[in-house]
Amino acid sequence: MKFFLVVFSSLISFSLMAGQLTSGAQVVELINTNNDTEDFAIFLKNGSGPCAIATPEGVYKIVFPKTSFANQSSESYGQAFSISLAAITSGLKVRVHNFDNNNCDQANFISIYSAS
């Protein structure tokens, strides 16, 4: 019985964390296209998660391709760009997620929050 509970609880916690690319990060640059494609990218510093591997300059990039929003509302892509813009303007922290996998080049969710 204990074995079942351990396996069950680890499966639940894995599914809750699957796709979280970074958390507690600060957006330091926002670009409206990446490699001349229909997407945008954010450069971040600090934070934690599988994408939070900084370059020698101290930043890392996460890309939001429009195709990653296919299962969401038609407004979701624009909302993600707006939230990214608000994050860089305010300096607040962000959490970025990919509902499909852990690919840092296919993000489709971003939240902005105060760290207080």
Image (cartoon, rainbow, N blue to C red):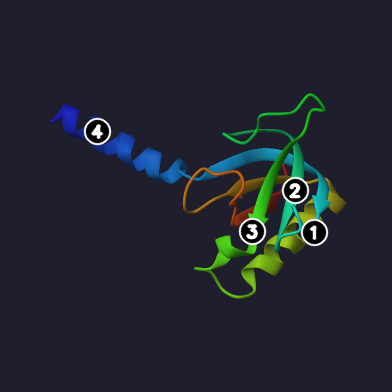
Real-space Cα distance between discs 1 and 4?
43 Å
Q: Is residue 37 left or right of residue 104?
A: right
Q: CA distance from mark 2 to mark 4?
A: 36 Å
State the image coordinates of residue 89 (x, y, percent, origin top left).
Answer: 87, 53
Residue lying farthest to the front in this orientation: 36
- The reply to whether dot 4 and dot 3 touch (C-beta < 8 Å) is no
Query: Could you tell me the amino acid type at mark 3?
Result: Pro
Note whether residue 116 is visible. no
Q: Is residue 13 above or below residue 99?
A: above
Q: CA distance from mark 1 to mark 3?
A: 11 Å
- The residue tagged 4 is 7
Classify residue 98 as left or right of residue 65: left
Gap between marks 3 and 2 measured at Cα: 11 Å
Q: Which residue is mark 3?
A: 65
Q: Amino acid at mark 4?
A: Val
Mark closest to the chain's N terminus, 3 or 2: 2
**Neighbour class for label 3 at 10 Å: few (<14), some, many (≥20)?**
many
Horizontal side of 103 relative to 14 (left or right) equals right
> Dot 2 lies on which element?
strand
Q: Amino acid at mark 2?
A: Ile
> Label 2 neighbourhood size at 10 Å, few (<14), some (14-19), many (20+)?
many
Q: Where is mark 1, residue-wise?
A: 32
Residue 12 in picture, x, y percent from top left: 34, 42
Q: Is residue 8 left or right of residue 89?
A: left
Q: Which residue is mark 2?
A: 42
Which residue is rendered at x = 47% and y = 53% of the image?
A: 100
2 vs 4, front mark: 2
Tell me where residue 106 appears, x and y as whole percent: 58, 52
